[in-house]
Amino acid sequence: MPRIFGSVQHAVFLLRKLGLRRFAIVVLYWLLRRYHRWARPLINRDGGTGGPGQNQRDPVLLYQMPKVGSTSLVYSMQLALVKAGHFNTQVHHAHTLTNLDLHERLVRDANGPAHQLALVQEYKRIRAALEADPHQHWNVISLVRDPVARQVSDFFHHLDRNVPDWDRRWREGSLTIEQVLENFLVIEDPTRHWFEGEILSVLGIDIYDSAFPTEAGYCIYSRLPKVSLLVIRLEDMNRVVDEAIEQFLGIKGFKLHSFNMGSESNYGEIYKAFKAKPLPAWYLEKAYSGRMARHFYSIAELEKFAEKWSKKETETSAVPVLPTISLAV
């Protein structure tokens, strides 16, 4: 964490990227970790289960695919650990820990922005730390989300790349929502096999070995003595996160705080128009027949997702819910 504040330039970048509230949380977390001896008497330690001298806990790694709502969890976790008196606990955040040399080379070859290169290098440090000590236990948390909602969120997050010059074209009326939809439909979801490519290959945990408890909304896996893994469905976060975090980390009264960056403000109008258009049945069938979707969600839940995304622009239009889709395992 001290590495974050290595330069004024990078601190300014973080301030712009995170916003004032989240930047303040990062600063507070870093200061309390660095100066915890002086800060400890000021912090309420009732939220933790450890006694004096147990403020050093196993590192926490928030490791999940992009656009599953992990940002709020990152900063909420930092706040919870500080409140519980666990000042020295390291909190890491990564979307990928594989093929990092290739990612770094691609960023360098494309002369990408400095923050992209810094992110890849941070991921490499996390991977090195994960592999450095075979006896060091890690607590890993991963999130999963309705795959269509995740893909839509990712598409609009990278709208400048996916629909070049969209802002000018939309304002001029030369870009239709049908054209935006066409662009969306041809982009493959790169996260369909994320748990095999990341969690299994890096942590050695195969989440598909056992059924996921859809009613509970979360599940804890182990590969002792190295890793414990908590997987939570984003749709159940508000309902179960406090219970799940207490069971997983022993931190009572965990609160999930919202840290909304307002990133939709630039494309709010076009995003609203997109969501008013139904997605084709073939696309929903493909998305919800995937292994990950069928593992984490029940058939009834997938059909409910499909109904939402296949709705017509007029409420009077009758839409069959995936008439040909087969969701049986």
Image (cartoon, helix red, strand yellow):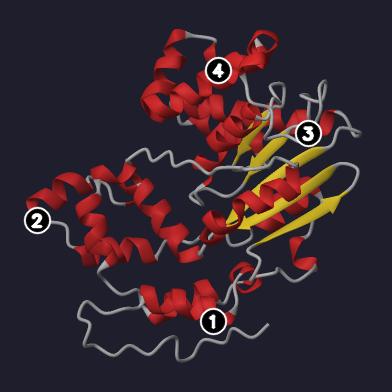
Q: Is residue 156 above or below residue 117?
A: below
**Mark 4: which secondary structure?**
helix
* Residue placed under numbered mark 3 in the picture: 130
Percent coordinates x, y for residue 320 in the rendering: 38, 90
Amino acid identity at mark 2: Gly
Per the model, the C-alpha gap separating discs 2 and 1 is 40 Å
- Image quadrant assignment for residue 73: top right
Q: Is residue 17 left or right of residue 95?
A: left
- Few, some or many residues within 10 Å of mark 1 (<14, 14–19, 20+): few
- Circle number at residue 224: none
Q: Earlier in the sequence, mark 4 or mark 1?
A: 4
Q: Is residue 58 above or below residue 196?
A: above
Amino acid identity at mark 1: Ala
* Residue placed under numbered mark 1 in the picture: 300
- Circle number at residue 173: 2
Contact check, label 2 and label 3, Cβ < 8 Å: no
Q: Earlier in the sequence, mark 1 or mark 3?
A: 3
Q: Nearer the viewer, residue 274 or 265?
A: 265
Per the model, the C-alpha gap separating discs 4 and 2 is 43 Å
Q: Is residue 186 left or right of residue 167?
A: right
Placement of the C terminus among the 4 image quadrants? bottom right
Percent coordinates x, y for residue 94 in the rendering: 61, 38
Contact check, label 1 and label 3, Cβ < 8 Å: no
Placement of the N terminus among the 4 image quadrants? top right
Nearer mark to the viewer, of 4 and 1: 1
Per the model, the C-alpha gap separating discs 2 and 3 is 51 Å
Q: Earlier in the sequence, mark 2 or mark 3?
A: 3
* Residue placed under numbered mark 4 in the picture: 4
Please name the residue shown 68% across and 47% down the image.
Answer: 245
Contact check, label 4 and label 1, Cβ < 8 Å: no
| Residue 112 visible to the viewer | no
